[in-house]
Amino acid sequence: MAEPKKIAFLVHAEGIEQVELTDPWQQVEKAGAQPRLLAPKLGTVQAFNHLTPADTFPVDVPFADAEPADYDGVVIPGGVANADLLRLDRDAVAFLKAHVAAGKPVASICHGPWLLVEADVVRGKMLTSFPSLATDIRNAGGQWDDLEVQVCTMNGWTLVTSRNPDDLPAFNRELLKAFGL
């Protein structure tokens, strides 16, 4: 029997939009894959329901100890503070760059594409996000459109993006396809 696929969920210590973490996580688990929470350090991370603190989640692997080769896909949940802090984390940026360089799929929702911009991997890609990121994405060489879900296979790797929690059903459907689940 083959090992289950491992999917990395990249988050920072706080500000994660909880449903954008938990909903895809549950879908990945239901599909038989193993989700793993990656963050700057071991311990717990704080999720939010918009601006209200919600649940905490245990970190499986710190970014600095994570090997991109060990993961079959990456999910980047949103949350304004989460995404803003995440793009400043050199280890998170390096992990994502190596994952993309290996041609592996990425799914990012809401403000999550800020990490893609920082990693300089959106050039030539078509994507969507929370509307406030449109200019950042265009300035980084990506093509932004206001869509429920965007799947782009250009540049040798698959990127699945969505705008906000309302898009989670379409986002989850497409990320499962992209991850081969």
Image (spheres, helix red, strand yellow):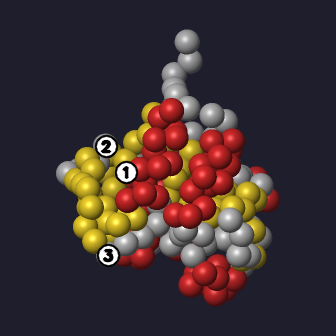
Quarter of the image holding residue 127? bottom right
SS under mark 1: strand
Instruction: Please report contact status of discs 3 and 1: CB closer than 8 Å, yes or no.
Output: no
Specify the label residue 71 is tagged with.
none
Using the rendered view, name the quadrant where residue 108 is placed. bottom right
Position in image of residue 12 (x %, y %): 34, 63
In the rendering, at what x and y percent does residue 110 appear? 54, 69
Q: Secondary structure at mark 2?
A: loop
- Please tell me the numbered disc located at residue 51: 3
Residue 59 percent across, percent down from the top left: 29, 48
Give coordinates of residue 114: x percent, y percent.
Answer: 52, 73
Label 2 or label 3, whichever lies nearer to me, is 3
Instruction: Verify CB contact (< 8 Å) between mark 2 and mark 1.
Output: yes
Residue 38 — which label? 1
User: Which residue matches tag 2?
Assistant: 60
Q: Can you see residue 36? A: yes
Residue type at mark 1 is Leu
| Image quarter hosting the C terminus | top right
